[in-house]
Amino acid sequence: MKAFFYLLLLTNIVFAVLQWLYPYEQLFGRTRPVAAAEQLVLLDELQSTANTTTASERRADEPTQAALPSVEKKLCYTLGPFKDEQRAQEVIVAFKQHDLTMTTRPSREQEYLGMMVYIDGHASRNEVVATAEALAEKGIRDYMIINEDTLSNALSLGVFGLKKNADRRIQRIAALGYQAKSEPRYRTRTIYWLDYNRAEPELLLPLVDRLKVEHGISRITRACS
C-alpha cells in the first residue's frame, strides 16, 4: 500500500515538472476551436456563386476573338444647283478631261421672284386701262396689265424683293384712293445637279471653289447609292 502511494506521488511530481518545463500545447498539440455556429449560406447566393464561377471558367476557355475591321463606306459627290445648263455642260467637259465622268440630274423647282403689288376687280380691259391712266396722271407710271388664270384684268404695280417695300407701295396707292393687294410670285424653272462617284483631283479644286464663290454652286458629299 505504501509503495502504491509513493508511486502515485512520484508520478504527480514528474507531471508537474514536465508541465512547468513545457507548455501544455507542446505536450498534447494545438486543437482547433470548434465554431459555435456555421455561417448560413442562402440557396440563391450559392446558385449565383456557382453561375459566376462557371461563366468565369467558360470565358477563360473561350479563345479571344479579334476585333472585326469596320467597313468603310464609299462616298460620292454632287455639284449644284446649276441654273444655267450651258455652265453645267462646261463643268462636265472640264471633269471629263481628268477622266472623271459626271451624270446630269435635272429637277424642277419654284423660284421666288418677290411680292407683287396689284389692283384687281376690273370687269374688262377698258376698266384696267382707265385705272392705269388715272394713276399715271398722279405719278404712278410703273405698271403692267396682266391676265392669268387666277388674276384677270389686273393691274400690276411692280414686284418687290422685300415685303416692307411692297407694303410701302400699297400705302402710297391707298393714299391716292385705290385699294391694292400683294402676293408672292414664283416661276418654275429647271436646275441641274452633276453627280460623280469619286473625289476630283487637286487640279479641279480651283474650279470647284470658283463655282461656289461666283455662282453659289456647292460640292455635296453623299453616300453612294
Image: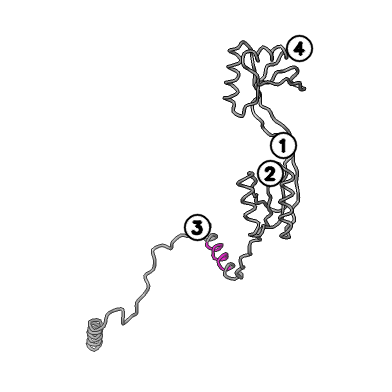
Question: Camera-side residue: 176 or 23?
Answer: 176
- Specify the segment rendered in magenta: 49-57
Residue type at mark 4: give it: Asn
* Mark 2 or 3, nearer chain start: 3
**Where is the N terminus found, in terms of image quarters?**
bottom left
- Image location of residue 163, percent across then percent down: 59, 26
- Image: 157 above or below 215: above
Q: Which numbered disc flags the more N-terminal residue, 4 or 1?
A: 1
Mark before the other along the chain sequence, 2 or 1 = 2
Marks 2,1: beta carbons within 8 A: yes
Q: Amino acid at mark 1?
A: Glu
Give the Cα separation between the discs numbered 2 and 3: 73 Å
Residue neighbourhood size for the residue with mark 3, other residues' Cα within 10 Å, grouped as few (<14), some (14–19), many (≥20): few
Q: Which residue corresponds to mark 1?
A: 109
Q: Amino acid at mark 3?
A: Leu
Asked whether 13 or 183 is in front, the reply is 183
Checking the image for residue 42, the label placed there is 3
Residue 98 appears in view: yes
| Distance CA(mark 4)–CA(mark 1) | 36 Å
